[in-house]
Image (spheres, grey):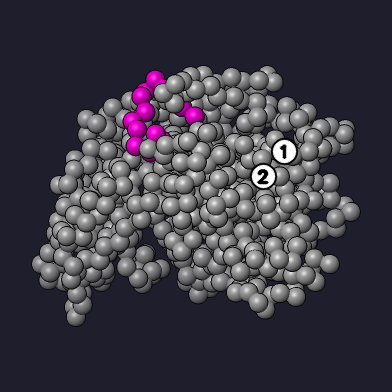
Amino acid sequence: MLREKIEKHLLEIQKPSRYIGGEVGSVIKDKSKVDVRFAFCFPDTYDIGMSHLGMKILYSLTNERENYWCERCFAPSEDFENIMRQNDIPLYALESLDPIKDFDFIGFTMQYELSYTNVLNMLDLAGIPIFARDRTEKLTQIVVAGGPCVCNPEPLADFFDLFILGEGEEVNLELMDLYHEMKKQGASRKEFLRKACHIEGIYVPEFYKFHYKDDGTIERLEVTYNAPETVKKRIIKDFDKVYYPENFVVPFTEIVHDRVSVEVLRGCLRGCRFCQAGFIYRPLREKHTDTIVEQTKCLCENTGYDEVSLASLSTSDHSEIDPMLTKLLTYTAGEKINLSLPSLRVDNFSEELLEKIKRIRKSGLTFAPEASTQRLRDVINKNVSEDEIMNTCRIAFEGGYSSVKLYFMMGLPTETDEDIKGIAELAQRIIDLFYTMENRPKGRGVQISVSCATFVPKPFTPFQFEPQDTRKMIEHKQKLLLDSVNKKRVKVSYHDADVSILEAVLAKGDRRLCDVVYTAWKKGCKFDSWGEHYRFDKWLEAFEECGVDPSFYANRRIEYDEILPWGHLDYYVSHEFFVRENKTAHEAVTTPHCRLKCSGCGVNKEIGGRCFD
């Protein structure tokens, strides 16, 4: 019945292949032989969700178990959503085309804050009560979430039964095993949650109640049902042996990253003070070169893709980067497969690495100085000098490149107008370098692309205590930058200030924001990360109606001794380390990266010794 309803309307919508399933590599099972069904939901379109590596890993891992079935589900675009609502088509999973309300688990991966309203919209489309408190006591429809945003899940706490903190390869199956056993026993939802909260990495928000002071800060946290006082994230210790799929689902339609992805390392050793991913994924763990090459070969042969990307936070920090690329290029060149190498750093860029990159990439090079002046780079602990930036550009120009893209952040702590002007000045010095080089590419002019993101203070970083610039301050700096650049040779782009403001509020918010998210969704907010859908005016109405001041979360400095909305969640890096690093930042003093010297962040204690010998 549902299949017939769907097929009837496919020619009325854009990209109907998003909604039909049946792709090569998708897993179909006999429902009568399945004990636990998991709907893996990505709260954005198919094109974006199918590019997500985490979904590929957990999809295949779960389906390795014969009696468990993981299926995929994505947020429908507006044209198909309208058809679904008009024709009573509930949100369904692509493999079986069954409504996800009939599944045991409805799991969301939370990759960015501006997808929060999409979660509510998908639950509503599925016919699942949006608030956890409204769901039946029957053990079914367990709504869960994982991903980087759940390091502060409080703005979503009222909508989820539980959150999975950290890496999911082990804990997901442990959770499903517990569910399977308790379902056979006829347990209730509450009985299951009371057991589940004692699995390391599982946070059940219902068992935690916040009490607030008159000034809006948190007075205390009350823990009930004998739940853990602190919930620790899960971590995969032997990354070289962790499960990795031998096959991916191959879409019928083009997606954002339409290629094989091979994860080469997880975590980061750099300690950039603004970077949440660099801290919540610690410690750095890397795969052996032979493992990377074998996984690349396996996936390319099984999927038929002719492009492979190396996934990491900082690929060039792999300790075997040169031999790894040599072996990979031997294979990919012979098979006529393109190799994509993102995440390059200025301070370990070399002529040898460039020669390898030239065999891989024909377009321009991209680097991220993040700040224009040495003082500000020291504040954020970028540990990159201007000499290294200029030397990298020189190597690139000598190697035949004439275009370079530079990423910066705007609104960083202690930033001044001189730092903003410094972006234009640094771009001009790179232009001047190009024209002073005798062996520069002939017959072409240089082009510098400058991309500026607005700084968003995030939990579990040394800058979690910092206020974000106000909208007026952001717009002033954007205009100052535009007025300062050489418009003939420098192309400038930057993020919308309103988008960054909402991201900061949701990133650092507490449970009082649940009503704001719900109210914004009721006003029509969804796909907030898409410019054509973003309605900041509706969000402001929601804040006002709920009596919540967004500036309390975005523009207020947090005191070091405040109770944080995420303070009961442990991602291994200690609060004391973040305080120390924040103070060091305001002194413009850098901290060496982990291979040079242990900074005592706390991760080493959790893994039973030094991260690097």
Q: Against 407, is 595 above or below?
A: above
Under mark 2, the amino acid is Ile
Q: Residue at x 71, y 69 (%)?
A: 20
* Mark 1 Cα-neighbour bin, 10 Å: few <14, some 14–19, many ≥20: few
Q: Residue at x 18, y 67 (%)?
A: 487
Residue position for label 2: 130
Q: Residue at x 81, y 32 (%)?
A: 188
Q: Of all residues shown, which one is farthest toward the left?
A: 436
Position of 89 with respect to 336 (left or right) is right
Tell me which secondary structure the magenta stretch mostly adopts.
loop
Position of 489 with respect to 408 (left or right) is left
Indicate the secondary structure of the residue bearing disc 2: loop
Query: As rendered, which of 248 and 490 lies closer to the eye?
Result: 490
Query: As rendered, which of 471 and 320 lies closer to the eye?
Result: 471
Residue position for label 1: 134
Indicate the secondary structure of the residue bearing disc 1: helix
Queried whether the magenta region covers residue 35, the answer comes back as no
Q: Evaluate whether residue 302 shows in this view.
A: no
Under mark 1, the amino acid is Asp
Q: Quadrant of residue 71?
A: bottom right
Magenta region, residue range: 552-565
